[in-house]
């Protein structure tokens, strides 16, 4: 029989939810027995509008130290908003602060206006998928505390992540049938595809 631990809440703070309200809702979810809470990683409201919310990874750090049992994470972080090695280091830090409760959602990105308004290039879908593949070659080993020596067309890293940890990764989005292929070939069973 399912319990509330099998269910969670999804927040879309880019619609105008303050960082404090997000924390309050995560504490509410934990207090009332929910198993997890996710928040989007958007920089702008969707659709076009004017609202403000706290930055995703900063708020995830606050959730990590403000809750004790709730699993949480981004649903999902586009790999092209942040350098993949830096994103992996951020995720490792949040995962360590939360004692292993981070559910690290990753995707290829899709909201063109968001990219352009924040000064990022918005490449064609095929390029974003190639970037996603390269990012996984950096992020997966780094979030597991392994050495990374990778030089790709879009990203590179030569770092050793210590201490060894294990981070659960979620592959998000409907990437035209290739989500399962990416999970099988890159993740070694450490991910869960989501739509």
Image (cartoon, grey):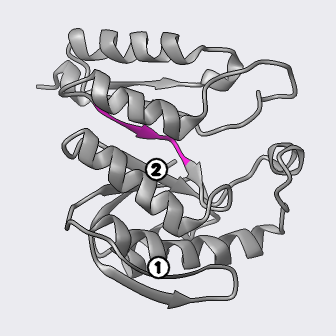
Which residue lies at the image location 46% right of the left edge and 76% below the top edge? 138
The part of the chain drawn in magenta is: 71-76
Q: Return the residue found at the far left.
A: 1
Q: Nearer the viewer, residue 54 or 191?
A: 54
Q: Would residue 169 be found to the left or right of residue 106 on screen?
A: left
Dot 2 or dot 1, earlier in sequence? 2
Q: Is residue 185 above or below residue 128?
A: below
Q: Which residue is mark 1?
A: 137
Quadrant (top left/top right/bottom left/bottom right) for the N terminus: top left
Which residue lies at the image location 31% right of the left edge and 13% below the top edge? 27
Residue 50 location, x and y as percent?
A: 84, 19
Residue 119 location, x and y as percent?
A: 86, 53
Compute the Cα span from label 2 to label 1. 15 Å
Q: Which residue is mark 2?
A: 105
Which residue lies at the image location 74% right of the left edge and 52% below the top edge? 110
Asked if residue 178 is among those painted magenta in the image, a careful observer would answer: no
Badge 2 element: strand
Asked if residue 72 is among those painted magenta in the image, a careful observer would answer: yes
Crowding at mark 2 (Cα within 10 Å: few <14, some 14-19, many 20+):
many
Q: Quadrant location of residue 14?
A: top right
Q: Would residue 28 be found to the left or right of residue 39 on screen?
A: left
How would you classify the magenta stretch by its main secondary structure? strand
Q: Quadrant location of residue 167?
A: bottom left
Decide: marks 2, 1 in contact (CB < 8 A)? no
Q: Would residue 118 be found to the left or right of residue 186 on screen?
A: right
Tell me, yes or no, if residue 193 can be seen here.
no
Residue 84 location, x and y as percent?
A: 55, 66
Tell me, yes or no, if residue 72 can be seen here.
yes
Q: Nearer the viewer, residue 176 or 150?
A: 150
Q: Is residue 53 above or below residue 21?
A: below
Residue 125 location, x and y as percent?
A: 77, 67
């Amino acid at each position: 029989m399912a319990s509330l631990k099998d269910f969670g809440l999804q927040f879309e703070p880019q619609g105008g939810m303050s960082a404090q309200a997000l924390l309050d809702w995560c504490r509410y979810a934990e207090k009332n027995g929910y198993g997890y809470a996710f928040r989007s990683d958007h920089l702008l409201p969707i659709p076009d509008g004017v609202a403000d919310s706290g930055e995703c990874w900063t708020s995830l750090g606050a959730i990590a130290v403000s809750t004790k049992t709730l699993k949480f994470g981004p649903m999902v972080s586009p790999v092209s908003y942040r350098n993949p090695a830096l994103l992996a280091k951020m995720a490792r830090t949040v995962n360590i602060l939360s004692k292993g409760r981070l559910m690290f959602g990753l995707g290829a990105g899709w909201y063109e206006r968001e990219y352009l308004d924040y000064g990022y290039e918005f490449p064609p879908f095929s390029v974003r998928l190639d970037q996603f593949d390269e990012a996984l070659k950096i992020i997966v080993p780094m979030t597991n505390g392994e050495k990374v020596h990778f030089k790709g067309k879009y990203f590179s890293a030569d770092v050793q992540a210590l201490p060894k940890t294990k981070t659960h990764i979620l592959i998000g989005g409907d990437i035209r049938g290739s989500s399962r292929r990416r999970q099988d070939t890159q993740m070694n069973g450490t991910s869960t595809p989501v739509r």
